[in-house]
Amino acid sequence: MVAALVIVGAVTAAVYSTTRQGDPVASDEQKVESAIRDFYATLDSEGFRAAVEQSCALDRAEFAAMSTTDKEAFRSTSFDIDIDTVEDITITRDKATAEITGVFTVDFPGEGPETDTTSTEHLVKEDGRWKICYSEDKG
């Protein structure tokens, strides 16, 4: 019985560790998916400011350059994010895209909620970690 629990624990730990960004065993595709899920979980639970800290340097710089009024508008925006799938991950050197599906509701103050069900995410690899990068979508 104890041996079975040890084996189940080891398998669970191995599966969990191969899907996390910091794990050297995880594939880049797994790390991209993890970065997306972590970013949106942070956005959903902790808000925009916390999520920006997980984004790429270009996005962080863009946020830092925003007016106080714009920053407050983003801080006041509520997010309800439920990701179902992360698919079609394409990696080219230090850039990646992925298609996500789920329910993504953004409620801008004074404008009412907007809901989408799909999104194309752009990521860059900085300091060995994949990060969401909306600035990449502009170029």
Image (tube, rainbow, N blue to C red):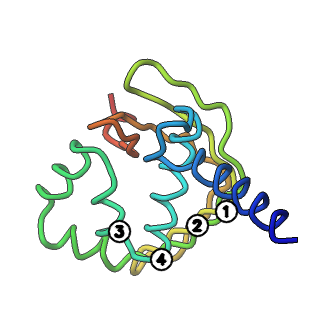
Q: Are marks 4 and 3 in contact (CB under 8 Å)?
A: no
Query: Mark 4 near mark 1, Cβ–Cβ under 8 Å?
Result: no
Residues marked 1 and 2 touching at CB (< 8 Å): yes
Classed neighbour count for the residue bearing mark 4: other residues with Cα under 10 Å, few (<14), some (14–19), many (≥20): some
| Residue occupying image coordinates x 39% and y 74% | 47
Q: Earlier in the sequence, mark 3 or mark 1?
A: 3
Position of 22 relative to 40 (above/below): above
Residue tagged by mark 1?
A: 103
Label 4 to label 1: alpha-carbon separation: 15 Å
Q: Give the residue furthest to the right.
A: 1
* Residue 48 numbered tag: 3
Seen in the picture, residue 67 relative to 58 is either above or below; the reply is below
Residue nearest the observer in this picture, 85 or 137: 85
Q: Name the residue tied to disc 2.
A: 81
Task: Give, as a three-letter code, the residue at label 3.
Answer: Phe
Place residue 125 in its image quadrant: top left
User: In the rendering, at what x and y percent does residue 59 appear?
Assistant: 26, 48
Q: Which mark is residue 45?
A: 4
Q: Secondary structure at mark 4?
A: helix
